[in-house]
Amino acid sequence: MVRAVQVLMNPKGDTFSGEMRNSQNSRFGKNGKLWCILAAILLWASGTMVGNAQGSAPYSLGVSYDSPSILSDRSLGPLFSREGKWTQNSLDIGPIWVSTADPASENSEQNIFYPFITRNRYGDETRVQVLQFLSWTKTARDTEKSDSPPEPKGVTLFPFFFYKQPSSTTDGYWAFVPIYGELDNRLFKKHIEFVLFPLYARTEKKDYETWNVLYPIFHLRRGDGIQGWGVLPLFGLESKDARVITNSWNDPEAVDGYHNGFFLWPFISWATMENPDRRYLTDVAVLPVFRVLRSDDRDSTTLLWPFLNWTEDRGEKYKELGFPWPLVVFARGEGKTLNRILPFFSIGEKGSLHSKSILWPLYRQNITDASTLYRRRDQILFFLYSDLRLRNKESGEESHRQSMWPLWHTSTDTQGTRDFKTLALLEPIFPLDEELQRAWSPLWTLYQSKAKADRSEKEWTTFLNLAHGQKSPTRKSWKFAYGMMSHESTTEEKVYKVFSFPVWRQSQRSQSTDM
């Protein structure tokens, strides 16, 4: 049949068909191997997915296998992670994409090459930032949930362009630095307006206004009990009246007053502060010759500023001598004790705070021993080695974090769950930035494990998730090369799999019965 077809297609019987056939067979041989490999990978992936769907819990560090409300999936590769935990869902394709969503609270966060591009959503408000310089916000309200109109949109290209759309309740603003603009509640000011900055600017903050011409040379300040002016660095004066006001809780509140001035700033300055109960503080400085501070509770004198310093604090009950300050300082009294000769040593105690250093910054120790909290941190060369211990004195709960950059990092939470990781390039420097660790740490983590305090449950993984295993009281398992070879042992049976398909199975019941 095949020969007949060949004759019909090539009745002359020339050698072209033979060459074509040989070429096709050679091409099929090469492509056939590729298709066989792809088919095997697809069968393995589908078998892994089916196994996960049937309850063969995939790898997820720190997640209990027996919890029905938790689902994690790392079966698609070393940098892919999908996890659902209670009301939160997370998806990581590190370091490209790191996201977390909580539908219950309507909050979500997406990061692209964190921290370069971030998107945060809090209820109806969405904020996008690019390297913290370019940002824009948008708020859209569901008409079924609220009768109020949508909140204004905003765009920022820091520090050159600022824009916020007006709404029915707030005025909009825009600014193009340094040409012209107005801003509300930005840059730590209530209101800012400027023209050809630094030629002219006016700012509002709390209860006073400031006008600047050729900022910061000329300024004029007026407000509630405040008045002042200055020509920097030549001369300036400012004062505020001390008084008692009624706060938002309808309680009397004392507001401190002051009288400040400078001449040839920063060399000569003076300040007097007072409050309604007639307590005073006077600070006069002619730098670098001397600085003198006098108050009801504290006196301080500095000669050849800042080298020779003498302080008597009657409020906290201690006396302190520094020469040359801050390298050599000694303090004695009920409120503070300090012996410091840097960089050789420093040992101090002030209230619940205790500090110690030897050959700073080679070794440092800081202890906080408060009524409800004990905290101790030991460091060698800042974050090269760090050991942090926390203990709640009331509940007895303890946590521990230890790291040696860049070799390893380990932490133990208040429940006794221990997490170990090597290598650790980011954890010792940014121990609290979970998004940064989720995005980048999988690229160099050689081994990671997490185990409960009683060791009843443990999980581990190797570089790029090539091998990982789990252990619980009812189940043990390990996988190699993303499930190409795996083993699972339960109280019911033992199973060995290749490409996620069982190749050997043994019943545990029959074995225990025979014994």
Image: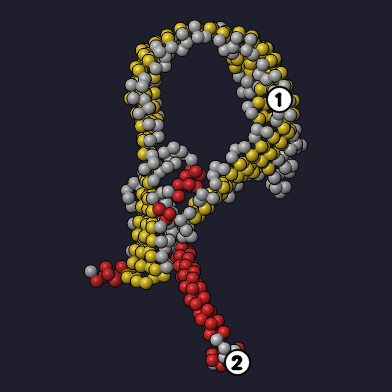
Residue at far front of view: 15
Earlier in the chain: of badge 1 and badge 2, it is 2
Tell whether 362 sits left or right of 46.
left
Residue at far right of view: 168
Quadrant, the N terminus: bottom right
Given this view, does label 1 or label 2 mark the residue nearer the observer?
A: 2
Q: How would you rate the neighbour count of disc 2 (Cα within 10 Å): few for under 14, some for 14-19, many for 20 or more?
A: few
Q: Dot 1 corresponds to which residue? A: 197
Q: State the residue at coordinates (32%, 48%).
A: 454
Dividing the picture into quadrants, the one containing residue 263 is top right
For badge 2, the amino acid type reads: Pro
Residue 11 badge: 2
Mark 2 element type: loop
Return the residue nearer the eye: 75 or 88: 75
List x then y, in percent, for residue 271: 57, 9
Residue 1 badge: none
Q: State the residue at coordinates (34%, 71%).
A: 505
Tell whether 38 sits left or right of 244.
left
Residue 484 in view of the camera? yes
List x then y, in percent, for residue 102: 56, 48
Q: State the residue at coordinates (36%, 48%).
A: 452
List x then y, in percent, for residue 391: 37, 34
For badge 1, the amino acid type reads: Phe
Scheme of image coloration: secondary structure
Mark 1 element type: loop
Q: State the residue at coordinates (42%, 67%).
A: 500
Tell whether 271 sits left or right of 41.
right
Residue 86 in view of the camera? no
Q: How far apart are the two marked residues, 1 and 2, measured between alpha carbons? A: 89 Å
Dividing the picture into quadrants, the one containing residue 311 is top left
